[in-house]
Image (tube, helix red, strand yellow):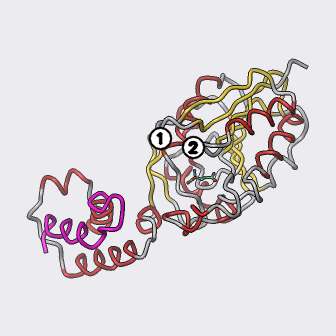
Amino acid sequence: MNITQAIEKGRLCLSESDSPVTDSRYMLCYVLACTISYLHTWPEKKLSEQQGTDYEALLFKRKKGMPVAYLIGQQSFWSLELDVNAKTLIPRPDTEILVAMALEKIQLGMIVADLGTGSGAIALALASEKKNVHFMAMDRSQAALKVAQANAKKHKITNITFWQGDWLSSIAKNTLDMIVSNPPYIASNDPHLKRGDLRFEPSIALVSGQDGLKDIRLIVKQARLVLKSKAWLLIEHGYEQANEVNMLFQQAGFEQVQCAKDYGDNERVTLGQQPLQ
Ligand code: GLN
């Protein structure tokens, strides 16, 4: 089997996936330890017997629904290739808008916390762009923190402290210059949880009570205590939650509350500023 044939095999095998050819290419690159451009340059290159077997095993698992990111242990986010595993959410392009918004507001010398960091995606993207800012990457899950720390090491990013904690409960009052978070925000009975990649991702990173807002409510409340005067809170949420999240920010007393859309034109990130104290 050569590269062209392998991709064709994947296309046929994964006909139920939204992206059978792309999925096949990623898995083939993983097996051959090569880049996508190598696949285009050497379409007639033959796979060894072992490579063929490994590739077919991946196709089989993918056909059963396992996300490509977990099969190859990798997902790109911002400018970084991140390690991921089943203990961490798979970073989404939607979340890059949160990174872009935060970068506009981050200034030299700040201390910025990323709550529920998972694979470290948001903290690492920000820290890779802002070397003179200190970041705290926090998560309740030790297993996720281990992945995030490994990603920091892989990308030689040293301006992050990793911290295990339950949202902001262990943070002293009036200490943070910014908080960013992609918390769980899916309602526990949402049928999407039974479809696609979500079936395989850790529910601790996805599900937030009956209305999906349990954690956002808590973070907004706690953030008012730990943010310094004029500091910003930026939270990712579901595409239908913008109004409710806006209200939570307003009720808590945040100012300049606004919403930003993601690349899919969905209202995805709400931000607000701590009043002058
Ligand atoms: N953005 C993810 C999805 O809806 C959910 C991530 C989250 O709950 N933070 O697929």
Residue 20: say if magenta.
yes
Seen at 45% across and 54% down, the residue is 75
Q: Is residue 166 left or right of residue 152?
A: right
Residue 160: say if magenta.
no
* Relative image position of residue 160 (x, y in whole percent): 65, 43
Q: Quadrant of the N terminus?
A: bottom left
Q: Are marks 2 and 1 in contact (CB under 8 Å)?
A: yes
Q: Nearer the viewer, residue 13 or 45?
A: 13
Q: Callout 2, which amino acid?
A: Leu
* Relative image position of residue 187 (x, y in whole percent): 70, 57
> Which residue carries the number 2 mark?
124
Q: Is residue 57 above or below residue 3?
A: below
Q: Please provide the residue range marked out in magenta.
A: 1-22
Seen at 17% across and 73% down, the residue is 47
Circle 1 SS class: loop
Quadrant hosting residue 225: top right
